[in-house]
Structures are given as structure tokens and as C-alpha cells.
Image: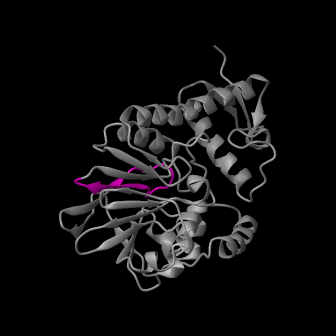
Amino acid sequence: MESVPSLDLGPVTVHFGAKTGKYPDGNQVIVRGRDETVAFDTPQVANRLGALLQQVDRVILGHVHEDHMAGLHLVPAKPVHVHEADVDAARSWEGLSRHYGYPQPILDALHAKIERDFQYAPRPDAIGYADGAVWDLGGGVRVRALHFPGHTAGHCVLLVEPDGIAFIGDIDLSGFGPYYGDASSSLADFRRSLHRLRALPARAWITSHHRGVYTDRAAFDEALAAFAAKIDEREARLLQMLAAGPQTLAELVRQRLLYPPHADDLWIDCAEARSIGQHLEELLAAGRVRHDAGTGRYRLAKP
């Protein structure tokens, strides 16, 4: 096995991906009980762990995206469990395409990219699980799936009991902020999930990406507050953009709300459109923005 930095937390071992799991990599979590060993997700770093990953009894995905499936090809005969709202995205490319919701030319290019860069392989045998599902690993170690949607429709926190170790996945507390740019994403659900996460009975929090592990409650609370604040910062920025005058969604997308101008990943324009569109829906419902159906332009509501 190639040398990979790791950290032990009771029955949990976190194997850190490059740059503490910064995308396109991630952090690999392995949980050991007396009778079973399970993996949470399979990021790119899984391919550097060799036989260690192949020794697990099952894989539990906290949600479905290409970077969380990058090691599934190593465990073709092991059961893979996915929340029922995401399971179709794990079972086939057609399901994953609906999950993303991008135009066909983007999907075609993305399909080739994730096969090349993430060893993408669908799992038609993926098993759906529901909110509250429990896996008993033996020796008093349990894994409980808790539905925290927003990033995807089926995004879950995987809580290792009774130790209170929470794998919070792509509620990743990064400086980028919450991502809700796909067809299966929901800004409203993400807001609710972030509020609920504060009350989760945990003593340690593991992110899929970049931040890694928090074991100090005050530090976690501070990081969570900063992460959640990105949503309101984006709303304020969008209102500033509209203060310059009425604009179409396409015009707003070109200015970029989430990504820096130099970013050029395949999905960025789609993610910008989906994210800005959800913010506009909230602002329309609140009466802060108006939409002219004739011109397709959005404008600030008059005070």
C-alpha cells in the first residue's frame, strides 16, 4: 500500500487524500467493527490504498458524485449502499445524467472525463437505503445514515455510534461554500440541513474535502457558521449585480456568482445557472426581485 497520511478516531480511520482531500480527491473513511469493516465513499485516494479497500465488507455512499465513486471499481463484488434519492445515479450513467441535469453536449464530454479521471463505473446492483438506516458492525459499533439533503437529493451524514463520529460528506466547510448547482441539488434543503447539523450529537466531524477532521466543538461551530454564511454572501452579491440594471439569467451567469472568472470546468455555466436560478426563486418569493416574462430580465423590486 502506498503511504497515505491517516488519523485514527476510535473505530474510524481517515485516510487523507491530496491536499486533505481537496477536489478532485477526497478523504477515505474506514470503520471497523468486530464483525464487519465498511468504507464511506471511495474517493481517488482509494486507488492508493491497494488491498486495504478491497478488504472492506461493504461500501456506504453518503451521496453520489463522480469523485465519491472513484474507487468502486476496486470492489466490484462488495455491496454498495446509497440513499434511495441518489441510488439511480449510482446504478447507471442515465441516472447520473439526470442527477447532474446538464445539456447533452456537456454530459457527453463529462462522461468521457469521469471515465478517464475518476475510473467511473456504474453500480447497477447498488442497494437503496432510507433515512435512519443502521448497519451493525459488531462489538457495539454501528453506522447510522441521517438524511441531510441539499448538495444532492440523497446526501446523508453517516454517524458512527456510540462514538459520535460524523462523516458530513460534502457539507465540507470549505471556503468555496455550499454547492447546490446540479438538478438534484436544493438551496432550500441545504439551508435546512445546515441548521439541523448544529444539533447533531457528535464529538468529531469528518469532511469529504479539504478541511478533514474537526474534534473541537468551537472550531467546528465557527467553520459551519462561515460555510453557511456563504449563501447569504452570494445573495447579497446577486442583488448587487441586479442593482446595475435588469438582466437575464444568461447575463448573470456570465458574471459568475460561485466561481472565479478563470475557472473553466465543463459544468460551471450549468452550475452557475442552477445556483443563481434558485437564489432568484427565493428573491422572487420574498418580493425583492421582479421578473419580466417578455424580456426574460430580472430586476430589483422598487422599495
Which residue is drawn at the image coordinates 48% and 35% (left, top)? 223
Which residue is drawn at the image coordinates 22% and 53% (left, top)? 162
Farthest residue, direction left:
140
Which residue is drawn at the image coordinates 46% and 56% (left, top)? 153
Q: Nearer the viewer, residue 58 or 51?
A: 51
Residue 103 place in picture, x, y as percent: 71, 63
- Specify whether residue 5 is painted magenta: no
Which residue is drawn at the image coordinates 74% and 57% (left, top)? 265
- Residue 109 position by quadrant: bottom right
Q: Is residue 260 left or right of residue 135?
A: right
Q: Is residue 172 left or right of residue 80?
A: right
Q: Is residue 234 above or below residue 158?
A: above
The span shown in magenta is: 146-162
Q: Is residue 230 above or below residue 268?
A: above
Q: Quadrant of the C terminus?
A: top right
Its colouring scheme is one colour
- Specify whether residue 151 is painted magenta: yes
Residue 241 place in picture, x, y as percent: 74, 28
Q: Is residue 216 above or below residue 116?
A: above
Farthest residue, direction bottom:
77
Q: Is residue 210 above or below residue 106?
A: above
Farthest residue, direction front:
3
Q: Nearer the viewer, residue 95 or 205?
A: 205
Q: Is residue 285 left or right of residue 242?
A: left
Residue 172 place in picture, x, y as percent: 51, 47
Residue 159 place in picture, x, y as percent: 32, 54
The total number of labels drawn is 0
- Residue 215 position by quadrant: top left
